[in-house]
Every structure is written in structure tokens, then in C-alpha cells.
Amino acid sequence: MAKQQETNLPEKSEPIPVEQVINGDAEKFLNSLMSLLNQTQIKNAATSTVSNDAILNKINEALIKTESVAVAFPPCSDVMLGLTDNMPVYENNINNLSVNHFFAEYFSFVSAGQRPHQEIPNGHKDRSRLDNLLGLNPCLTNDWPPQHCLPSPCILLEGNRRIFGENKLKRLFIGDLAWLYYIERMGTFQMLGRILEEYAYQGGIPMSNGSVHADVKDDMVALVLEAMTRQTESGNSSKVRDRDAAYRRSFGWTTEAGRSMSLNSSVNTAFGEQFHKFMYLALQFFKDKRLGTAIRATNNNIGITSTATLVTIRDTISLLKKSFDNFNYGRNYHTTLSGIVWAIAGLKLVEELRQTLGIPPEYTRPSEYIPAAFRILVTKSTVTTSNESNRFETHIECARNLRSILLDMEVLNFSDASVGGELEQWLNAAESSIEGYRTAYRTLTGVDLETSQTPVIEQGV
């Protein structure tokens, strides 16, 4: 639960008489209105903390209760992720992020007494057929699918993203595919592909085979490189074709690399249409509410939310939620898991190899060495322009904010569109994520999602 902040509220300013505005003193009125808007935002921040906590805790509890899904990890996941360290606390501050935090958002290492095997979850399903199979075939030793067919790594799909306390999310959602989309757009797989190419064939970057440095991590990095190279050669890596098919089928989106492949996958246009309509409506809701609250505050009245606006947002979320169903068919779920494993392992390799790549040793944060690695490995330049946004920060802001919005929608009671109801409470609590996604997306693409319900987006198929 978030801690309530103690805020010193400013004194209430005097309202500007209407006659004064009519007489031409519009500039003074606007300045007073802007000052009042700022004061109102401070008051709202102080008084809404408790209600925000309540709705976020409710969403938190609902997410924890979602049933896990039977999934096969990509081969060698535990080896490829073996360079990471488990971080027990979710990190909100982007300046303190590390690749280890990304690992903890999705996975945890198997501890003593735990079974690494990803079993079919009990849940509410009838397991009699499976139990009969295990009883008739003792060779399976209570494991199905058996280890010789789908080996289970010593890693569990248990992450701390969007969860408060000790509990973990034990499954993936469509919001996690959205996170993967922006991690890919950041250039993660391009950088990883270049590293593996140099390791296996080119040799232009002197990557040790484990015999150069005394630290045992030198051996571990070499084995991770070898494992990833072997999996790539055998066709078991996370592939552009697989990921792009998942983006098309789940979002109606594509990547620069995927666009050139001209896949015939079905395209979920409903997600893009309804999501961007939701963003437009939500942003208008925030703007109208701030303005309305400020104006009414001059007469000691509380700002009133438009019920019609909430109903429109409710109906939009309802249609948007229906489009989520596409994620639950075909290989989308497995493709997402594989992509996340390979993306995190690839980013960890960049971190471990940064000095080998020619990145200054003082670049210790992802926001420093990821943009540098992209310039060296992909664009093959060493110079950054002064007006260039930070590649890591803008993509991570998009990835995390969009994931947070979509995860909340999975369990949100959006049907309660009454004034002060659950939908309005959530909108107030999610304002930073919605505004944060809008700002980061505008920085990346130049498109402001507040200006149109049907924006022309770069990732559209």
C-alpha cells in the first residue's frame, strides 16, 4: 500500500469576478486559473491517496487470484538467465532499474524443496484424465509432459510486476506481450543478434571463451553465449516471425523487421481501434476534470465528473477487453514467454559485455550502456546528438506504463461507471500510467494520442 503523503496545501485564491473578465482582463483571469489548477492538483494529490490505495489493492488481490497457465519454457532458459540475480522488490524509479529487476518482474529461481517442473495447474479443471494417465504409466513419475519431451528449467514463472507484498504473478497476460513489443523496439534483439554473430562467426569483437579472465563469470558468459548460439542454430530461439505474428494477432501491430516479412497472420484491428479510443477519452477525462475542478473551486464547489464520459469510457473498455481474447489462442502465450526469456538474457549479456564492446566502464546503468551499445552494435556510430532522447528510458516508460494499464484492465470492474465508482477511482489511480504512456509514445513517434481517437500510429499493420 502506498504511503499517504503529507502536503502543505496553499491558501485558497480569490475568484476573479466575471465582470472583470468581460471588461478585458482576460490575461489576469487565465493566470489566476492556471494558478488555481496547480493548487487543485496539489489538493487532489493529498486527498486521493487513500482512495487510490483502495482500488490498487483490490486490483492487486484480483491479479494474484488469476489462474496460472500450463506453459513450456524455451530450452536452456535457466542457463541463458543464469547471469541474473533475483531482486525481491519491484523498482518504480527508472533511474534505479537494472536488468536483474526485469528478471524479477517475471521469474524467480527454484528454491530448496520446490519442483521446477511447470505442471498443469489444478485450478477448477477436471484432472481425472491426466491422473488416470499418470496412474497407468509409472514411468512418468507424476510428471506430464515428461522431462525428456519438454524439459523444465530451474526457473519459475513467478514475477513481482504490478504486485504489492510477497505474492507473485504466476502467468502472463496480453500486457506482457505489450512490454515485449517495446523492449524489441528498443533494439534488444538487434543487439543480441550482432553479439551472437560476432561470437560465432565474425570475431570482430574479442569475446572470451572463458580462458581470458580469472573471474568465473568469464566462463559463465561464454557458456551463455554458446547455449544461445546452439539454440539459434537449432531453431529454438525467439524468432522475428514468431514475435511479429503474436503482435499482429494480439494487437494489430508490427515491427520494422516484421513489416518486411509480409506475414499473412490475422490482424486484430479491434485492439488498436479501441485502445487508442480509450487513451483519447481518458486523456480528455483528466483534462476536463482538472479544468472543471479548478473552476468550481472558485465557488467552493467540488468538481463533478461527467457520467456520460464515464459511460463512454466503460463501453470502450468493454470492447477493448473482448479484443484481449486473441492473446489466448495459438502460440501467442508461448511466443511471449520465449521472447521475454531471450530479451532479458540478451540485455544481461549486453551488461556483462559492455566493456568488451567498448562502452566506458563508468556506464553502469541501463539508461547509459543500452543506448551506447545500440549505437556501437546496430547503427555503428559512437556519437549521440544533443537532442536525441534516451533510447532506454523512453522505451521502458512505454513498456511499463502500457503493461500496467493492460494488467489493471484484466481484473478491473469497469462496469461500475457511477460517479465515484470503481471505474472513476481506477482512472484517478492510473492517471500517471496513462499520461506517462502518452508522453513517452509522443517522444518516440511524434504522435500525440490526445489529439485523435484514430491516430496514425507507426506500429499499425
Image (cartoon, rainbow, N blue to C red):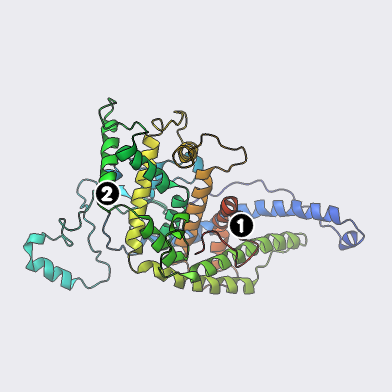
The residue drawn where x is 29% and y is 26% is: 213
Residue 459 in sight from this viewpoint? yes
* Most distant residue in the right direction: 23
Residue holding disc 2: 233
Disc 2, SS:
helix
Residue 113 percent coordinates (x, y):
19, 49
Please indicate whether residue 371 sits to the left or right of residue 263 in the image: right
Q: Nearer the viewer, residue 242 or 158?
A: 242
Are the residues flagged by discs 2 and 1 in contact, CB closer than 8 Å? no
Residue holding disc 1: 447
The residue drawn where x is 50% and y is 49% is: 395
Residue 76 percent coordinates (x, y):
25, 48
- Image: 322 above or below 48: below
Q: Nearer the viewer, residue 219 or 417?
A: 219
Please indicate whether residue 334 sits to the left or right of residue 413 in the image: left
Label 1 Cα neighbours within 10 Å, binned few <14 / some 14-19 / many ≥20 = some
Disc with the residue nearer the chain's start (2 vs 1)? 2
Please indicate whether residue 432 sits to the left or right of residue 341 in the image: right
Mark drawn on residue 376: none
The residue drawn where x is 54% and y is 69% is: 273
